[in-house]
Image (cartoon, rainbow, N blue to C red):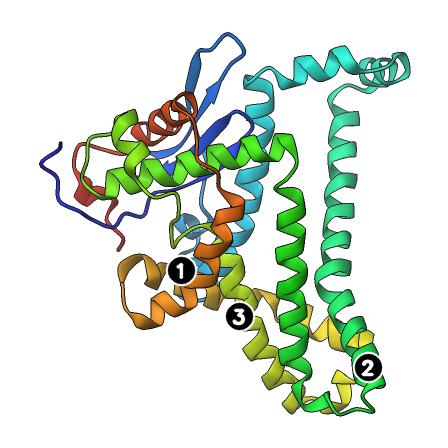
Amino acid sequence: MSDRKTHRTSVGGQALIEGVMMQGPRGVATAVRQENGEIVVKHHTFNHAKDKFKFLGWPIIRGMVAFVESMILGYRMLMYSAEASGMEDMEDVEMNKFEKWITDKLGDKFMSFIMVIATILGIALAILIFFYFPVLLFNRLNAWTDGVLTPWQGTIEGVLKIIIFVVYIAAVSRMKDIKRTFMYHGAEHKSIACYESGMELTVENVKKCTRFHPRCGTSFIFVMLIFSIIFSTILSKIFPDIATVRILWMLLKIAFIPLLMGFGYEFIRYAGRHDNIFVRVLSAPGLWMQRLTTNEPDDEIIEVGIEALKAVITDNPEDDEIK
């Protein structure tokens, strides 16, 4: 047992392909389990925009910036983990002759093009599922009830969005590869929980800790959904005419997403520093959802989480306290 006291840190991370990425006072680091069983730990350079432009670190704005940066960093680390774990070599074996010919001729340019297309299609699908469908479903329900539901448009659309999100995560979590990734997600949370509790970072100690954490991205998404219900309800009162036009209403809500991200980020920061009834109520849905997005890791996966965390922390816990 360590003599360190329980503390709340700013350390955070992300599950990767056969690995974990962590961010802390010593920067960004990954730990990836290779096919031969060895854990490869590597530090990565990532320049935060707020270090160059101070105003990007202001409240609300920093949340918008942090989201974009997390998407960029997350994508880079996923690509790195695929290479480091040996997954890319496995994919080469499974390629047919035409795919091999295309890859040999165009190389990295072809793969970059494919990833750009996949990203665009992913964003379009997200907009369709989480923005267009709720509006479409509400309009149908409202038409069937002769407009009785109109005053509750923002609230009902928000609830529909949450239902769609939960069903989507529940379906995805049943996939074999995703289940394993969620085990790494659990190892990330449990390792941080062990460190914050003041215990020594060992497999046995980490196993005792919770896999649910209030600063998780799952909690952030749920806070965003809750805020979107409140915000959409207010918007539908302010712009009642626009709310009846499906496309305009959807575009209006999309336009306000950055602002919602900013408020959601500030709440997650607040939740990381406080433990009161307000935080517990708003954090509860996200913590519950982590039962789907995290799985209990085995000892080997926990070892990866520990190595990733050790790479970004210092000997002085005060260095990573939430400011």
Position of residue 160 relative to residue 8, above or below, is below
Residue at label 3? Answer: 226
Residue 279 place in picture, x, y as percent = 35, 67
The x, y position of residue 256, in whole percent, is: 62, 71
Which amino acid type is shown beneath numbered disc 1? Ile
Q: In front: 166, or 14? A: 166
Mark in the foreground, 3 or 1: 3
**Marks 3 and 1, the one that precedes in the sequence:** 3
Dot 2 or dot 3, earlier in sequence: 3
Does residue 116 appear to the left or right of 20 in the view shown?
right
Counting residues from the start of the chain, the first of labels 1 and 2 encountered is: 2
Figure check: 68 above or below 110: below
Residue type of the residue flagged with mark 3: Ile
Category of crowding for the residue at label 2, using alpha-carbon neighbours closer than 10 angstroms: few (below 14), some (14–19), many (at least 20): few
Which image quadrant is residue 113 in? top right
Q: Secondary structure at mark 3?
A: helix
**Viewer-nearest of labels 2 and 3?**
3
* Disc 2 to disc 3, C-alpha distance: 23 Å
Residue 104 in the figure: left or right of residue 39: right
Q: Which mark is residue 245?
A: 2
Q: Secondary structure at mark 2?
A: loop
Which residue occupies the extreme top position in the image?
Answer: 36
Residue drawn 26% across and 55% down? 323
